[in-house]
Amino acid sequence: MKYLSVSVLCAAFLLLFLRPSPRTLLRNLGSGRGGGLFSSLASSVTPSLPPLGEGQVRILYSPDTDLEREDRAVLDTAKSTIDAALYALTDQYICDALADAARRGVRVRVYRDRQQYEEEAARGAHARRSTCSAELVASGAQVKVKASTELMHLKSYTVDESVLRTGSANISPIGEKRQTFGKPLRRAASCCVHPLALMISAILETS
């Protein structure tokens, strides 16, 4: 072939010289939802893990685990509530999960960091596209932005006040799939989950 795309040349280099495992190759070349070479294949390499039992804790790390896939699987189980405090919110796959939950009648409430929210809004305006936060509001979810510019650095949510997700992984394609981050998931007693839900309730109900 006379002409080869940059992506194909990069894939050939990886195969011939670095000799990664097929799983590693797919994971590294995939860059999010429909955004990279073989991304659809990469998302199917690791199946969703079984649901957590009562009192169980699961700690997951990217890029070895597709956190985006696991977050989506947890959010899709919501029946009554999702309460979230999210520093970044740019992963469209997760945004769709939250919006879908709101549309099917789940009470979805999201608290955002002001600087990240404003940066996302500016990028959206420049690209003439809607932000995830705007899409959530349109779907019926509640979104509140921190009044001050003091950092709100949580990456946490609760589902039905029984499952808590927290850790260092941002809700972004890079944070969920490519960077090295950890994410504990816990199905636990109310003492572990309720504080986040109560904090978000207090924030959303005072203004």
Image: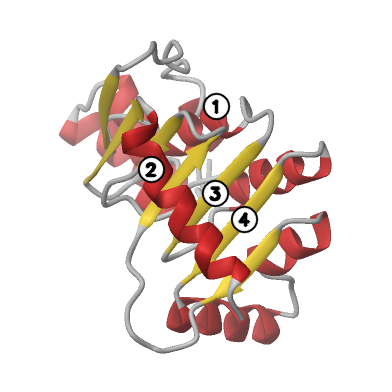
Amino acid type for the residue under numbered disc 3: Asp
**Which mark is first along the chain, 3 or 4?**
3
Instruction: Using the image, tell me which numbered label, if any, was put on residue 73.
Output: 1
For residue 66, say whether it is visible. Answer: yes
Q: Position of residue 30 (x, y in %)?
A: 45, 41
- What is the basis of the colouring in this image? secondary structure
| Quadrant in which the C terminus is drawn | bottom right
- Residue 67 vs 207, above or below: the answer is above
Q: What residue is at 55 percent from the left and 58 percent from the top?
A: 201
- Residue position for label 2: 177
**Which mark is first along the chain, 1 or 3?**
1
**Which mark is first along the chain, 4 or 1?**
1
Horizontal side of residue 8 vs 58, given as left or right: right
- Badge 1 marks a residue whose secondary structure is helix
Amino acid type for the residue under numbered disc 4: Arg
Would you call the spot at circle 3 few (<14 residues within 10 Å), some (14-19), or many (20 or more)? many
Marks 4 and 2 in Cβ contact (< 8 Å): no
Would you call the spot at circle 2 few (<14 residues within 10 Å), some (14-19), or many (20 or more)? many
Locate residue 61: give its quadrant. Answer: top left
**Which mark is first along the chain, 2 or 3?**
3
